[in-house]
Image (cartoon, grey):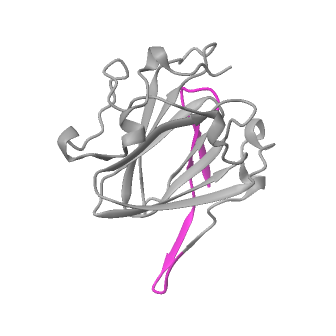
Amino acid sequence: MAWIKTKFEGVWIFEPKIWKDDRGYFLETFTATSMPEEISNISFVQDNEAKSTRGVLRGLHYQLPPYDQTKLVRCVVGEVLDVIVDVRPDSATYGQHLSVILNEIGKKQLFVPKGFAHSYVVLSETAIFAYKCDNYYAPQQEGGLLYSDPNLGIDWIIPNNELIVSEKDKNLPLFGNHKTFL
């Protein structure tokens, strides 16, 4: 297992060891004792799973304190472009984003700490996306960013006219007008 630190404070990419043979494969998708020391105090309380078709874009979402969430995300079936945006005002990477391809082949996961807006778009015909959260969903504490905000400069890979986005997500604010994460 490899935990790879990114330029974003607290954000890690997890590359699990995959054991393959003629029967298929085996891997550990989560082991608390393998986590880097600086994030080893996380206790996940909720697992979520979503199935979507090609072009579905979900996000960019976050929750405000005290209901903010740390997530460990992965693509179980298919392939997605996973994107996070730093919404921590005091961060050196505030307003910057990270894009990572997650798929069923490499089994990579992304560790997303509190203070990041999260989103993904499905690149394959279908995808099953799963994630662990360290806090429960609290709709009254939702925040979000408009996925197409030109100031964020996110390349979603799929052309804009092929994206399938909920009305709620189409109406999220631009980065400069979002609910401040404090």
Looking at the rendered structure, the number of numbered marks drawn on it comes to 0
Image quadrant where one finds the C terminus: top right
Residue 80, magenta (yes or no): no
Residue 16, magenta (yes or no): yes
Tell me where residue 54 appears, x and y as whole percent.
28, 57
Which residue is drawn at the image coordinates 30% and 38% (left, top)? Answer: 156
Can you see residue 82?
no
Horizontal side, residue 54 vs residue 51: left or right: left
Check the image and report above or below for 65 versus 42: above
Which residue is drawn at the image coordinates 38% and 52% (left, top)? Answer: 80
Check the image and report above or below for 131 versus 42: below
State the extent of the magenta-drawn residues as a range: 1-25
Tell me where residue 53 appears, x and y as whole percent.
32, 61
Tell me where residue 101 appears, x and y as whole percent.
39, 47
Image quadrant where one finds the N terminus: bottom right
Which residue is drawn at the image coordinates 34% and 30% (left, top)? Answer: 154
Can you see residue 92?
yes
